[in-house]
Amino acid sequence: MKMNFKFFKSLRFRIMIILVIIGIIPSVAVEKGIVNSYEDRAVSLRSFGVKNQCDILVNQLIKEQYLNDQSSEGINSELTMLSNVYSGRILIIDQDFRVIKDTYDIDRGRYMISKEVVRCFTEGKESSIYDRKNRYIEMTLPIYQGLEEKQQVSGVLLISVSTEEIVASIEILEQKGLMILLIIAVLVLGLGYVLAGILMKPFAKVTRAIEDITDGFQDEKISVPDYTETELITDAFNKMLGRVKSLDNSRQEFVSNVSHELKTPLTSMKVLADSLVGQENVPVELYQEFMQDIAEEIDRENKIITDLLTLVKLDKKAANVNIETVNINELLELILKRLKPIAGKRNIELVLESYRPVNAEVDETKLTLALNNLVENAIKYNVDEGWVRVSLNADHKYFYVTVADSGKGIPEESIDHIFERFYRVDKSHSTEIDGTGLGLAITRSAIMMHHGAIRVRSTEGEGTTFSVRIPLTYIG
Ligand code: ADP
Protein backbone atom coordinates (compact mmCIF):
# COMPACT_ATOMS: atom_id res chain seq x y z
CA MET A 1 0.00 0.00 0.00
CA LYS A 2 2.72 2.41 1.01
CA MET A 3 4.73 1.61 -2.10
CA ASN A 4 1.72 2.36 -4.30
CA PHE A 5 1.16 5.67 -2.65
CA LYS A 6 4.82 6.50 -3.15
CA PHE A 7 4.53 5.72 -6.83
CA PHE A 8 1.64 8.13 -7.25
CA LYS A 9 3.70 10.83 -5.60
CA SER A 10 6.70 10.23 -7.82
CA LEU A 11 7.91 12.49 -10.59
CA ARG A 12 7.91 9.44 -12.83
CA PHE A 13 4.16 9.04 -12.39
CA ARG A 14 3.63 12.73 -13.09
CA ILE A 15 5.71 12.66 -16.26
CA MET A 16 3.69 9.62 -17.31
CA ILE A 17 0.42 11.43 -16.73
CA ILE A 18 1.63 14.43 -18.72
CA LEU A 19 2.63 12.18 -21.62
CA VAL A 20 -0.73 10.42 -21.48
CA ILE A 21 -2.60 13.73 -21.48
CA ILE A 22 -0.50 15.07 -24.34
CA GLY A 23 -0.98 11.82 -26.26
CA ILE A 24 -4.66 11.15 -25.63
CA ILE A 25 -6.37 14.55 -25.66
CA PRO A 26 -5.43 15.26 -29.30
CA SER A 27 -6.47 11.75 -30.29
CA VAL A 28 -9.88 12.24 -28.70
CA ALA A 29 -10.21 15.61 -30.42
CA VAL A 30 -9.25 14.14 -33.79
CA GLU A 31 -11.71 11.29 -33.35
CA LYS A 32 -14.54 13.64 -32.42
CA GLY A 33 -13.65 15.90 -35.35
CA ILE A 34 -13.69 13.04 -37.82
CA VAL A 35 -17.04 11.75 -36.56
CA ASN A 36 -18.61 15.21 -36.63
CA SER A 37 -17.41 16.09 -40.09
CA TYR A 38 -18.54 12.71 -41.37
CA GLU A 39 -21.97 13.39 -39.92
CA ASP A 40 -22.17 16.88 -41.46
CA ARG A 41 -21.09 15.60 -44.82
CA ALA A 42 -23.47 12.62 -44.77
CA VAL A 43 -26.42 14.77 -43.72
CA SER A 44 -25.75 17.43 -46.36
CA LEU A 45 -25.29 14.80 -49.09
CA ARG A 46 -28.54 13.17 -48.09
CA SER A 47 -30.35 16.53 -47.96
CA PHE A 48 -28.96 17.43 -51.37
CA GLY A 49 -30.18 14.16 -52.91
CA VAL A 50 -33.62 14.44 -51.33
CA LYS A 51 -33.97 18.03 -52.44
CA ASN A 52 -33.12 17.21 -56.04
CA GLN A 53 -35.72 14.47 -56.11
CA CYS A 54 -38.31 16.70 -54.49
CA ASP A 55 -37.62 19.57 -56.90
CA ILE A 56 -38.45 17.28 -59.80
CA LEU A 57 -41.52 16.06 -57.96
CA VAL A 58 -42.74 19.57 -57.14
CA ASN A 59 -42.42 20.53 -60.80
CA GLN A 60 -44.55 17.54 -61.70
CA LEU A 61 -47.07 18.44 -59.01
CA ILE A 62 -47.39 21.92 -60.44
CA LYS A 63 -47.59 20.64 -63.98
CA GLU A 64 -50.36 18.21 -63.19
CA GLN A 65 -52.19 20.60 -60.83
CA TYR A 66 -51.99 17.95 -58.11
CA LEU A 67 -53.21 20.38 -55.48
CA ASN A 68 -56.60 20.43 -57.14
CA ASP A 69 -56.74 16.80 -58.05
CA GLN A 70 -54.89 14.04 -56.24
CA SER A 71 -55.98 11.20 -58.43
CA SER A 72 -52.85 11.09 -60.63
CA GLU A 73 -51.63 7.53 -60.42
CA GLY A 74 -48.18 8.39 -61.69
CA ILE A 75 -47.54 11.02 -59.05
CA ASN A 76 -49.05 8.99 -56.24
CA SER A 77 -46.82 6.05 -57.01
CA GLU A 78 -43.83 8.32 -57.34
CA LEU A 79 -44.60 9.80 -53.91
CA THR A 80 -44.86 6.34 -52.40
CA MET A 81 -41.64 5.25 -54.07
CA LEU A 82 -39.76 8.30 -52.87
CA SER A 83 -40.93 7.87 -49.30
CA ASN A 84 -39.93 4.21 -49.45
CA VAL A 85 -36.49 4.91 -50.88
CA TYR A 86 -35.70 7.36 -48.09
CA SER A 87 -37.71 5.47 -45.47
CA GLY A 88 -39.54 8.69 -44.82
CA ARG A 89 -42.88 10.33 -45.16
CA ILE A 90 -44.22 12.92 -47.53
CA LEU A 91 -47.05 15.32 -46.75
CA ILE A 92 -48.60 17.73 -49.16
CA ILE A 93 -50.38 20.69 -47.63
CA ASP A 94 -52.70 23.06 -49.42
CA GLN A 95 -53.29 26.78 -48.94
CA ASP A 96 -55.70 26.14 -46.03
CA PHE A 97 -52.93 24.24 -44.17
CA ARG A 98 -54.78 21.06 -44.72
CA VAL A 99 -52.97 17.85 -45.44
CA ILE A 100 -54.20 16.63 -48.79
CA LYS A 101 -51.72 13.80 -49.16
CA ASP A 102 -49.88 11.71 -46.59
CA THR A 103 -47.83 8.74 -47.72
CA TYR A 104 -48.56 7.19 -44.32
CA ASP A 105 -52.25 7.93 -44.76
CA ILE A 106 -52.54 9.04 -41.16
CA ASP A 107 -52.91 12.79 -41.23
CA ARG A 108 -54.90 13.33 -44.40
CA GLY A 109 -57.58 15.90 -43.84
CA ARG A 110 -55.96 17.27 -40.73
CA TYR A 111 -54.38 20.66 -40.42
CA MET A 112 -50.65 21.20 -40.26
CA ILE A 113 -49.50 24.60 -39.04
CA SER A 114 -45.86 24.10 -38.15
CA LYS A 115 -43.44 27.01 -38.15
CA GLU A 116 -41.63 25.77 -41.25
CA VAL A 117 -44.84 25.23 -43.19
CA VAL A 118 -46.06 28.74 -42.35
CA ARG A 119 -42.72 30.24 -43.33
CA CYS A 120 -42.76 28.33 -46.55
CA PHE A 121 -46.17 29.80 -47.41
CA THR A 122 -45.36 33.35 -46.41
CA GLU A 123 -41.77 33.66 -47.65
CA GLY A 124 -41.91 31.11 -50.42
CA LYS A 125 -38.61 29.64 -49.20
CA GLU A 126 -37.64 26.07 -48.75
CA SER A 127 -36.17 24.92 -45.44
CA SER A 128 -34.23 21.96 -44.24
CA ILE A 129 -33.81 20.90 -40.62
CA TYR A 130 -31.72 18.10 -39.24
CA ASP A 131 -33.12 16.69 -36.00
CA ARG A 132 -30.19 14.84 -34.55
CA LYS A 133 -31.95 13.44 -31.52
CA ASN A 134 -34.92 11.97 -33.37
CA ARG A 135 -32.77 11.03 -36.32
CA TYR A 136 -34.51 12.62 -39.28
CA ILE A 137 -34.17 15.44 -41.78
CA GLU A 138 -37.27 17.52 -42.40
CA MET A 139 -37.64 19.61 -45.54
CA THR A 140 -40.35 21.94 -46.76
CA LEU A 141 -40.61 23.00 -50.39
CA PRO A 142 -43.12 25.51 -51.77
CA ILE A 143 -45.49 24.43 -54.51
CA TYR A 144 -46.26 27.39 -56.76
CA GLN A 145 -49.39 28.14 -58.66
CA GLY A 146 -47.77 27.57 -61.99
CA LEU A 147 -44.30 26.80 -63.30
CA GLU A 148 -43.68 30.44 -64.27
CA GLU A 149 -45.45 32.14 -61.38
CA LYS A 150 -42.96 31.96 -58.57
CA GLN A 151 -44.72 34.46 -56.28
CA GLN A 152 -47.90 32.67 -55.42
CA VAL A 153 -47.33 29.69 -53.11
CA SER A 154 -50.38 27.51 -53.21
CA GLY A 155 -49.11 24.46 -51.39
CA VAL A 156 -46.20 22.97 -49.43
CA LEU A 157 -44.45 19.65 -49.77
CA LEU A 158 -43.18 18.43 -46.42
CA ILE A 159 -40.82 15.49 -46.41
CA SER A 160 -39.15 13.87 -43.46
CA VAL A 161 -36.32 11.48 -44.18
CA SER A 162 -34.87 9.05 -41.69
CA THR A 163 -31.13 9.36 -40.91
CA GLU A 164 -31.02 6.01 -39.18
CA GLU A 165 -28.43 4.78 -41.69
CA ILE A 166 -26.15 7.73 -41.07
CA VAL A 167 -26.45 7.22 -37.32
CA ALA A 168 -25.60 3.55 -37.73
CA SER A 169 -22.47 4.45 -39.71
CA ILE A 170 -21.52 6.99 -37.07
CA GLU A 171 -21.91 4.40 -34.37
CA ILE A 172 -19.61 2.03 -36.20
CA LEU A 173 -17.15 4.88 -36.75
CA GLU A 174 -17.31 5.78 -33.07
CA GLN A 175 -16.71 2.21 -31.99
CA LYS A 176 -13.69 1.93 -34.23
CA GLY A 177 -12.47 5.29 -32.98
CA LEU A 178 -12.81 4.13 -29.40
CA MET A 179 -10.84 1.00 -30.18
CA ILE A 180 -8.06 3.04 -31.74
CA LEU A 181 -8.16 5.41 -28.78
CA LEU A 182 -7.82 2.53 -26.37
CA ILE A 183 -4.88 1.15 -28.29
CA ILE A 184 -3.28 4.60 -28.32
CA ALA A 185 -3.92 4.96 -24.58
CA VAL A 186 -2.29 1.63 -23.80
CA LEU A 187 0.65 2.43 -26.05
CA VAL A 188 1.12 5.90 -24.58
CA LEU A 189 0.81 4.54 -21.06
CA GLY A 190 3.44 1.90 -21.69
CA LEU A 191 5.68 4.28 -23.58
CA GLY A 192 5.16 6.94 -20.91
CA TYR A 193 6.13 4.49 -18.18
CA VAL A 194 9.30 3.48 -19.97
CA LEU A 195 10.20 7.02 -21.06
CA ALA A 196 9.54 8.49 -17.63
CA GLY A 197 11.73 5.75 -16.18
CA ILE A 198 14.56 6.63 -18.56
CA LEU A 199 14.13 10.35 -17.83
CA MET A 200 14.29 9.75 -14.09
CA LYS A 201 17.35 7.51 -14.20
CA PRO A 202 19.92 10.22 -13.41
CA PHE A 203 17.97 11.12 -10.27
CA ALA A 204 18.05 7.50 -9.17
CA LYS A 205 21.78 7.65 -9.82
CA VAL A 206 22.09 10.67 -7.53
CA THR A 207 20.20 8.85 -4.78
CA ARG A 208 22.40 5.77 -5.17
CA ALA A 209 25.58 7.86 -5.06
CA ILE A 210 24.41 9.63 -1.89
CA GLU A 211 23.46 6.30 -0.32
CA ASP A 212 26.89 4.89 -1.20
CA ILE A 213 28.48 7.76 0.67
CA THR A 214 26.12 7.34 3.61
CA ASP A 215 26.86 3.62 3.81
CA GLY A 216 30.57 4.33 3.65
CA PHE A 217 31.25 2.59 0.32
CA GLN A 218 32.64 5.75 -1.07
CA ASP A 219 33.87 8.95 0.46
CA GLU A 220 34.85 10.90 -2.61
CA LYS A 221 32.75 13.61 -4.15
CA ILE A 222 29.78 12.43 -6.20
CA SER A 223 29.18 13.42 -9.80
CA VAL A 224 26.10 12.86 -11.98
CA PRO A 225 26.53 15.29 -14.88
CA ASP A 226 23.67 13.81 -16.96
CA TYR A 227 21.40 16.82 -16.42
CA THR A 228 22.03 20.38 -15.33
CA GLU A 229 19.63 19.70 -12.46
CA THR A 230 21.44 16.62 -11.23
CA GLU A 231 24.71 18.50 -11.53
CA LEU A 232 23.29 21.26 -9.33
CA ILE A 233 22.08 18.72 -6.77
CA THR A 234 25.41 16.88 -6.65
CA ASP A 235 27.34 20.16 -6.44
CA ALA A 236 25.19 21.27 -3.52
CA PHE A 237 25.59 17.85 -1.91
CA ASN A 238 29.37 17.93 -2.35
CA LYS A 239 29.48 21.35 -0.73
CA MET A 240 27.49 20.03 2.21
CA LEU A 241 29.74 16.96 2.39
CA GLY A 242 32.75 19.26 2.57
CA ARG A 243 31.19 21.15 5.44
CA VAL A 244 30.29 17.98 7.30
CA LYS A 245 33.81 16.69 6.84
CA SER A 246 35.43 19.87 8.08
CA LEU A 247 33.00 19.96 11.01
CA ASP A 248 33.91 16.39 11.78
CA ASN A 249 37.60 17.22 11.58
CA SER A 250 37.27 20.20 13.85
CA ARG A 251 35.22 18.15 16.28
CA GLN A 252 37.90 15.46 16.36
CA GLU A 253 40.59 18.06 16.76
CA PHE A 254 38.63 19.66 19.56
CA VAL A 255 38.19 16.37 21.38
CA SER A 256 41.87 15.55 21.07
CA ASN A 257 42.82 19.07 22.22
CA VAL A 258 40.46 18.82 25.19
CA SER A 259 41.90 15.45 26.18
CA HIS A 260 45.41 16.74 25.85
CA GLU A 261 44.75 19.93 27.84
CA LEU A 262 42.94 18.03 30.57
CA LYS A 263 45.74 15.49 30.78
CA THR A 264 48.55 18.00 31.23
CA PRO A 265 47.63 19.05 34.80
CA LEU A 266 46.90 15.39 35.68
CA THR A 267 50.34 14.33 34.44
CA SER A 268 51.99 17.05 36.53
CA MET A 269 50.00 15.97 39.61
CA LYS A 270 50.92 12.35 39.00
CA VAL A 271 54.65 13.23 38.77
CA LEU A 272 54.48 15.31 41.93
CA ALA A 273 52.56 12.67 43.85
CA ASP A 274 54.80 9.81 42.61
CA SER A 275 57.95 11.61 43.65
CA LEU A 276 56.53 12.08 47.13
CA VAL A 277 55.39 8.45 47.39
CA GLY A 278 58.68 7.09 46.02
CA GLN A 279 60.85 8.82 48.62
CA GLU A 280 61.30 7.85 52.19
CA ASN A 281 61.52 10.36 55.02
CA VAL A 282 60.34 13.24 52.95
CA PRO A 283 60.69 16.50 54.83
CA VAL A 284 57.44 18.27 55.66
CA GLU A 285 58.56 21.39 53.72
CA LEU A 286 58.83 19.35 50.51
CA TYR A 287 55.39 17.88 51.15
CA GLN A 288 53.99 21.35 51.59
CA GLU A 289 55.68 22.65 48.46
CA PHE A 290 54.56 19.73 46.33
CA MET A 291 51.03 19.82 47.71
CA GLN A 292 50.85 23.51 46.83
CA ASP A 293 51.95 22.68 43.29
CA ILE A 294 49.29 19.97 43.14
CA ALA A 295 46.67 22.46 44.36
CA GLU A 296 47.72 24.85 41.56
CA GLU A 297 47.36 22.11 38.99
CA ILE A 298 43.89 21.35 40.34
CA ASP A 299 43.00 25.04 39.97
CA ARG A 300 44.23 24.93 36.41
CA GLU A 301 42.22 21.81 35.63
CA ASN A 302 39.23 23.49 37.17
CA LYS A 303 39.68 26.62 35.07
CA ILE A 304 39.94 24.60 31.86
CA ILE A 305 36.74 22.73 32.68
CA THR A 306 34.90 25.93 33.61
CA ASP A 307 36.01 27.61 30.36
CA LEU A 308 35.01 24.56 28.33
CA LEU A 309 31.56 24.52 29.88
CA THR A 310 31.18 28.25 29.17
CA LEU A 311 32.11 27.65 25.53
CA VAL A 312 29.72 24.76 25.14
CA LYS A 313 26.93 26.83 26.62
CA LEU A 314 27.69 29.71 24.24
CA ASP A 315 27.75 27.36 21.27
CA LYS A 316 24.20 26.35 22.02
CA LYS A 317 23.40 29.76 20.55
CA ALA A 318 20.09 31.40 21.42
CA ALA A 319 19.18 28.60 23.82
CA ASN A 320 19.69 30.62 26.95
CA VAL A 321 20.24 34.23 26.07
CA ASN A 322 19.03 36.78 28.51
CA ILE A 323 18.67 40.05 26.65
CA GLU A 324 18.09 43.32 28.46
CA THR A 325 18.96 46.96 27.99
CA VAL A 326 22.33 47.52 29.61
CA ASN A 327 24.38 50.66 30.15
CA ILE A 328 27.64 49.72 28.45
CA ASN A 329 29.59 52.57 30.09
CA GLU A 330 28.82 51.17 33.54
CA LEU A 331 29.52 47.63 32.38
CA LEU A 332 33.02 48.63 31.20
CA GLU A 333 33.68 50.66 34.35
CA LEU A 334 32.88 47.62 36.45
CA ILE A 335 35.17 45.35 34.42
CA LEU A 336 38.05 47.83 34.71
CA LYS A 337 37.44 48.30 38.41
CA ARG A 338 37.68 44.58 39.01
CA LEU A 339 40.89 44.22 36.97
CA LYS A 340 42.58 47.32 38.37
CA PRO A 341 44.34 45.44 41.24
CA ILE A 342 45.94 42.97 38.81
CA ALA A 343 47.10 45.82 36.54
CA GLY A 344 48.29 47.76 39.55
CA LYS A 345 50.59 44.93 40.60
CA ARG A 346 52.66 45.47 37.45
CA ASN A 347 52.17 49.20 37.29
CA ILE A 348 50.06 49.00 34.20
CA GLU A 349 47.92 52.06 33.51
CA LEU A 350 44.29 51.19 32.85
CA VAL A 351 42.07 53.88 31.27
CA LEU A 352 38.54 54.06 29.95
CA GLU A 353 37.57 56.62 27.30
CA SER A 354 33.80 56.91 26.92
CA TYR A 355 32.77 59.16 24.02
CA ARG A 356 29.06 59.04 24.76
CA PRO A 357 26.59 57.21 26.98
CA VAL A 358 25.60 53.91 25.39
CA ASN A 359 22.61 51.73 26.19
CA ALA A 360 22.25 48.51 24.24
CA GLU A 361 20.23 45.31 24.21
CA VAL A 362 22.71 42.64 25.25
CA ASP A 363 23.16 39.58 27.42
CA GLU A 364 25.03 41.26 30.27
CA THR A 365 26.79 38.17 31.63
CA LYS A 366 28.03 36.98 28.26
CA LEU A 367 29.15 40.40 27.07
CA THR A 368 30.95 41.00 30.36
CA LEU A 369 32.73 37.67 29.86
CA ALA A 370 33.76 38.65 26.33
CA LEU A 371 35.06 42.13 27.17
CA ASN A 372 36.64 40.99 30.43
CA ASN A 373 38.74 38.45 28.52
CA LEU A 374 40.00 41.16 26.16
CA VAL A 375 41.03 43.53 28.95
CA GLU A 376 42.47 40.68 31.01
CA ASN A 377 44.60 39.57 28.01
CA ALA A 378 45.71 43.17 27.44
CA ILE A 379 47.04 43.19 30.99
CA LYS A 380 48.38 39.63 30.94
CA TYR A 381 50.36 40.00 27.74
CA ASN A 382 51.56 43.51 28.56
CA VAL A 383 54.92 44.77 29.67
CA ASP A 384 55.46 46.10 33.20
CA GLU A 385 54.72 49.85 33.42
CA GLY A 386 52.68 49.55 30.23
CA TRP A 387 49.16 50.86 29.48
CA VAL A 388 45.77 49.54 28.45
CA ARG A 389 43.24 51.88 26.84
CA VAL A 390 39.61 50.86 26.55
CA SER A 391 37.33 53.10 24.49
CA LEU A 392 33.58 53.13 23.93
CA ASN A 393 31.77 54.86 21.07
CA ALA A 394 28.51 54.41 19.15
CA ASP A 395 26.57 55.46 16.08
CA HIS A 396 22.86 55.00 15.32
CA LYS A 397 23.26 51.29 14.72
CA TYR A 398 26.24 49.88 16.60
CA PHE A 399 28.45 50.48 19.58
CA TYR A 400 32.20 50.06 19.33
CA VAL A 401 34.64 48.94 22.01
CA THR A 402 38.38 48.95 21.45
CA VAL A 403 40.93 47.46 23.79
CA ALA A 404 44.44 48.68 23.00
CA ASP A 405 47.59 47.73 24.86
CA SER A 406 51.30 48.46 24.85
CA GLY A 407 52.12 44.77 25.13
CA LYS A 408 54.39 42.49 23.23
CA GLY A 409 51.96 42.01 20.34
CA ILE A 410 51.03 38.93 18.40
CA PRO A 411 53.27 37.51 15.66
CA GLU A 412 51.76 37.76 12.18
CA GLU A 413 51.61 34.03 11.62
CA SER A 414 49.57 33.61 14.80
CA ILE A 415 47.02 36.38 14.20
CA ASP A 416 44.69 34.08 12.23
CA HIS A 417 44.72 31.44 14.95
CA ILE A 418 44.27 33.29 18.22
CA PHE A 419 40.49 32.78 18.25
CA GLU A 420 40.83 29.01 17.93
CA ARG A 421 40.15 26.88 20.96
CA PHE A 422 43.28 26.07 22.99
CA TYR A 423 45.49 28.15 20.72
CA ARG A 424 48.27 29.94 22.56
CA VAL A 425 50.96 31.89 20.74
CA ASP A 426 53.86 30.56 22.69
CA LYS A 427 53.21 27.27 24.37
CA SER A 428 56.33 27.61 26.47
CA HIS A 429 54.80 30.70 28.04
CA SER A 430 51.99 28.64 29.41
CA THR A 431 53.87 28.13 32.64
CA GLU A 432 54.86 31.77 32.80
CA ILE A 433 51.52 33.38 31.93
CA ASP A 434 48.49 31.53 33.13
CA GLY A 435 45.90 30.72 30.50
CA THR A 436 43.86 27.97 28.89
CA GLY A 437 43.80 29.21 25.29
CA LEU A 438 40.01 29.30 25.48
CA GLY A 439 39.53 32.97 26.44
CA LEU A 440 39.39 34.47 22.93
CA ALA A 441 37.26 31.57 21.64
CA ILE A 442 34.77 32.42 24.37
CA THR A 443 34.97 36.13 23.50
CA ARG A 444 34.33 35.51 19.84
CA SER A 445 31.40 33.13 20.50
CA ALA A 446 29.77 35.68 22.80
CA ILE A 447 30.20 38.46 20.23
CA MET A 448 28.87 36.27 17.42
CA MET A 449 25.87 35.48 19.56
CA HIS A 450 25.14 39.21 19.59
CA HIS A 451 25.60 39.30 15.79
CA GLY A 452 28.63 41.47 16.29
CA ALA A 453 32.15 41.40 14.87
CA ILE A 454 35.66 41.35 16.28
CA ARG A 455 38.92 42.42 14.63
CA VAL A 456 42.49 42.46 15.80
CA ARG A 457 45.50 44.52 14.76
CA SER A 458 48.88 43.94 16.27
CA THR A 459 52.52 44.88 15.83
CA GLU A 460 55.03 42.70 17.57
CA GLY A 461 56.86 44.57 20.29
CA GLU A 462 54.48 47.53 20.11
CA GLY A 463 51.06 46.38 21.13
CA THR A 464 47.71 44.96 20.15
CA THR A 465 44.28 46.50 19.51
CA PHE A 466 41.07 44.48 19.55
CA SER A 467 38.02 46.22 18.01
CA VAL A 468 34.53 44.98 18.75
CA ARG A 469 31.33 46.10 17.01
CA ILE A 470 27.90 45.08 18.36
CA PRO A 471 24.39 46.13 17.23
CA LEU A 472 22.56 48.41 19.68
CA THR A 473 19.35 46.40 19.28
CA TYR A 474 19.44 42.65 19.56
CA ILE A 475 18.55 40.70 16.40
CA GLY A 476 16.70 37.57 17.51
P1 ADP B 1 44.84 32.46 27.00
O1 ADP B 1 44.07 31.72 28.00
O2 ADP B 1 46.12 31.83 26.63
O3 ADP B 1 44.96 33.91 27.28
P2 ADP B 1 43.25 33.37 24.81
O4 ADP B 1 42.36 32.62 23.92
O5 ADP B 1 42.65 34.46 25.62
O6 ADP B 1 43.96 32.30 25.69
O7 ADP B 1 44.37 33.97 23.90
C1 ADP B 1 45.02 33.19 22.94
C2 ADP B 1 46.42 33.67 22.70
O8 ADP B 1 46.41 34.92 22.02
C3 ADP B 1 47.17 33.93 23.97
O9 ADP B 1 47.78 32.76 24.41
C4 ADP B 1 48.14 34.99 23.57
O10 ADP B 1 49.32 34.38 23.07
C5 ADP B 1 47.49 35.71 22.45
N1 ADP B 1 46.95 37.01 22.91
C6 ADP B 1 45.68 37.27 23.28
N2 ADP B 1 45.52 38.58 23.62
C7 ADP B 1 46.73 39.17 23.47
C8 ADP B 1 47.21 40.51 23.64
N3 ADP B 1 46.43 41.51 24.06
N4 ADP B 1 48.52 40.75 23.38
C9 ADP B 1 49.32 39.74 22.93
N5 ADP B 1 48.91 38.47 22.73
C10 ADP B 1 47.65 38.18 22.99
Image (tube, rainbow, N blue to C red):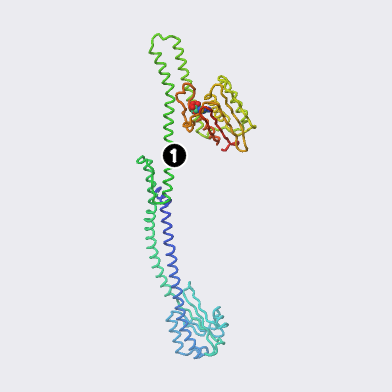
In this view, the residue in front, 428 or 16, is 428
In this view, the residue in front, 82 or 362, is 362
Image quadrant in which you'd find residue 150: bottom right
Amino acid at the residue labelled 1 = Arg
Image quadrant in which you'd find residue 450: top right
The crowding category of the residue bearing disc 1, from other C-alpha atoms within 10 Å (few below 14, some 14 to 19, many at least 20), is: few
- Is residue 307 visible in the rendered image? The answer is no
Residue labelled 1 has its Cβ within 8 Å of some atom of ligand 1: no
- Is residue 90 visible in the rendered image? The answer is yes
224 versus 150 height, above or below: above
In this view, the residue in front, 392 or 364, is 392
301 versus 355 height, above or below: above
Residue closest to the far front: 461
Residue closest to the far right: 357
Question: Residue 3 location, x and y as percent?
Answer: 39, 48
Q: Is residue 395 left or right of residue 238?
A: right
Question: Residue 30 location, x and y as percent?
Answer: 43, 67
Image quadrant in which you'd find residue 371: top right
Q: Name the residue under label 1.
A: 243
The quadrant the C terminus occupies is top right
Q: What secondary structure is marked by label 1?
A: helix
Marks counted in the figure total: 1
Question: Residue 271 location, x and y as percent?
Answer: 40, 18
Question: Residue 228 location, x and y as percent?
Answer: 42, 51
Residue closest to the far left: 217
Which residue is drawn at the image coordinates 52% and 25% (left, top)? 381
Which residue is drawn at the image coordinates 55% and 26% (left, top)? 406
68 versus 248 height, above or below: below
